[in-house]
Image: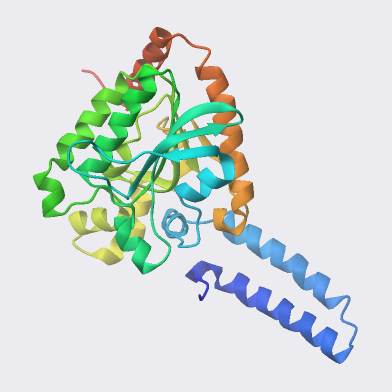
Amino acid sequence: MMAIILEFEKPIIELENKIEELSKFTAKEDIDLSDEIPRLKKRLEKLRKEIFDNLSPWQKVQLSRHPDRPYTMDYIEMIMSDFIEIHGDRHFGDDKAMITGLAHVNGRKIMIFGHQKGRDMKKKLERNFGCAHPEGYRKAIRLMRLAEKYGIPVVTFIDTPGAYPGIGAEERGQAEAIAYNLREMAGLKVPIIVFVIGEGGSGGALGIGLGDRIFVLENAYYSVISPEGCAAILWREPSKAPAAAEALKLTAPELLELGIIDGMIPEPLGGAHRNPMLAAEGIKKTIIKNLDELCALTPDALLAARYEKYRKIGVYGEE
């Protein structure tokens, strides 16, 4: 399968190809280029750093959607053990865009939830491109209640452009399912840790996004609407998506500054897909550290802290 190259990555790929060609030529022709290749490698590292340290919000959105980026199931395999997937909402059916199940992290039992996208077209259709139906959110809250009953902490991975907006989903109560989840998660008496691992779009993200601690990966985004959706509403022009991404303040550093999230998890240079294990290690350390802190609180203290956290979000004035 051909590697996907984003526009801003092209200078890096060109230099990588040049280094590879020179290395092959050196080996084949027995020519000494021992000075030239290290010089180019040093230039490559500098170029990588310059580009990825100065990405625009729109470029980060593009990176968050990279098809090689690790998805929920990838992180479950890298971080967790003894994963048992649990299916169905007990009302309508099982939504494959929403993964739910039991697992262990560093010996501690957790209930894990996450949007799941597909790699090839067959899987993309099966997973509905990571856009959950109402039954996906109802399955999630069913399992969250089960976690609460047995005192099991909840961990969620957000990666969706938004909840599925089809007629069937609307008929089955998409908006009600998300609103119900928000109300129930607000009062859940077990720790909830939320990670935005790719796209964090609108109510589709919020449906499993209310937590005691919220973390966004360096090249992920979290927003009330996708940049394209915002551009269509404000300017009626999809090409304005980069301007919309700028205005929405959807990147991890911006969200941290606004007090919406609790932390940004660094990614390997070039994105999580460049070194998935390194990205997974950062998430695992964050889960362990925050579970240790949150599990030390009583249920009443946990709920009080959660209430205060959301009361502090937002800016307002009084006259």
Farthest left residue in view: 171
Where does the C terminus fall, quadrant-wise? top left
Give whichever of 34, 231 is nearer the camera: 34
Q: Looking at the image, which residue is at 16% across and 39% down? A: 175
Q: Looking at the image, which residue is at 32% across and 50% down? A: 96
Measured as percent of width and height from the top left, residue 209 is found at: 35, 34
Q: Looking at the image, which residue is at 76% across and 72% down? A: 40
281 above or below 299? below
Farthest bottom residue in view: 29
Q: Looking at the image, which residue is at 26% across and 24% down? A: 184
Residue 249 is at least partly visible in this image: no
Measured as percent of width and height from the top left, residue 237 is found at: 22, 64
Measured as percent of width and height from the top left, residue 232 is found at: 21, 59
Query: Is 79 positioned to the left or the right of 46 in the image?
Result: left
Measured as percent of width and height from the top left, residue 117 is found at: 38, 55
Give whichever of 223, 89 is nearer the camera: 89
Give whichever of 306, 311 is nearer the camera: 306
Residue 136 is at least partly visible in this image: yes
When asked about the image quadrant of residue 87, the answer is top left
206 above or below 18? above
Identify the image's colour scheme: rainbow, by chain, secondary structure or one colour: rainbow
When asked about the image quadrant of residue 143, the answer is top left
Give whichever of 165, 97 is nearer the camera: 97
Q: How many marks?
A: 0
62 above or below 192? below
